[in-house]
Amino acid sequence: MTDISILGQTPLERLTNLMIRLRSEDGCPWDREQTFETIAPYTIEEAYEVREAIVAGDMEALKEELGDLMFQVIFHSQIASEQDAFDVNEVCDSLTEKMMRRHPHVFVEGDDRSVEEQTIAWEAMKAQERKSKVGKNGVLDDVALSLPALMRAEKLQKRAARVGFDWPDLDGVTDKIAEEALEVAKAAETQDPDAIEDEIGDLLFAVTNLARKLKIDPEKALRRTNDKFTRRFQSIEAYAANNGLSLEAMKLEEMEAQWLAAKLKS
């Protein structure tokens, strides 16, 4: 077997050659049968694991997870290379050119912009790039369908807001939330799953809009609440275990009392 450590002169070359070997006829059967579609879920999963390592403040884990995410980039690039579409070097070149184009204040002499001016110019360049892509002329085009729903809702709202389609103040948003909550209740009375789903989606979209207006990341806010709910529910489980009880046997009033106690501690 060829020693992977001597295949390339740089770490990126060694990793690329390792991927070539895995996809070769005498490589790994599992790796050979993968496609863009089959490995896409792993790519998304690795990105989330990078975030978990960052939240945990674990540098060793972050190094490992960034490696796993990089491997996904190499994997996609190798599949593309086999189809004569592009290779990893072209991915790197394309990214470098794009970043230089979007940072003229860094790479163009005499271009001295403020942070606010840079942000405006960045968005303008991205909009121009979208227009240059076939079939991507709309304001909401290229907001990825695969994004988590709350994140995509926020991005859609931000795009629309840039062209003036936005509530002028918080009152409009909070009124909309109240309106959508009533419509959820009305839909619930019909017992029509499609109508209920539609109205709950509208309510979540309106709440996301409120978070955006208040400059709060809705994904982060919901993750925070998820963590809070988990801690408080675990306190109920701990109480049950310490008192020889099963959760199923506990009354709702007992659970609520422990929930409140946990809430007061946090």
Image (tube, rainbow, N blue to C red):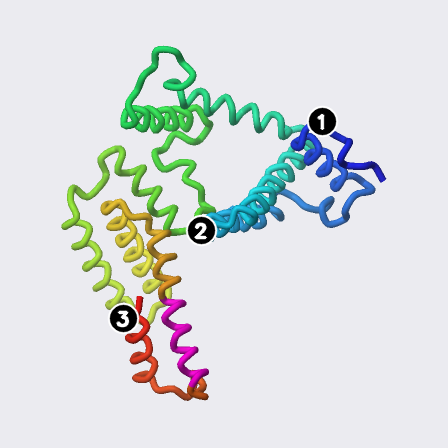
Q: Secondary structure at mark 2?
A: helix
What amino acid type should be assigned to the residue bearing mark 2?
A: Val
Q: Secondary structure at mark 3?
A: helix
Q: Which residue is mark 1?
A: 9
Residue 190 in which image quadrant: bottom left
Q: Are marks 3 and 2 in contact (CB under 8 Å)?
A: no
Q: Which residue is mark 3?
A: 264
Q: CA distance from mark 1 to mark 3?
A: 58 Å
Residue 230, x across and y down, in percent:
40, 67
Residue beneath the point at 34% across and 25% down: 124
Q: Secondary structure at mark 1?
A: loop
Residue beneath the point at 35% across and 57% down: 222
Depth check, front residue: 174 or 139: 174
Residue 49, x across and y down, in percent:
52, 51
Q: Residues within 10 Å of mark 3 (few under 14, many from 20)?
A: few
Residue 147, x across and y down, in percent:
44, 47
Residue 55: numbered disc: 2
What amino acid type should be assigned to the residue bearing mark 3?
A: Leu
Q: CA distance from mark 3 to mark 2?
A: 25 Å
Q: Is residue 95 left or right of residue 209?
A: right
* Region rendered in magenta: 229-242
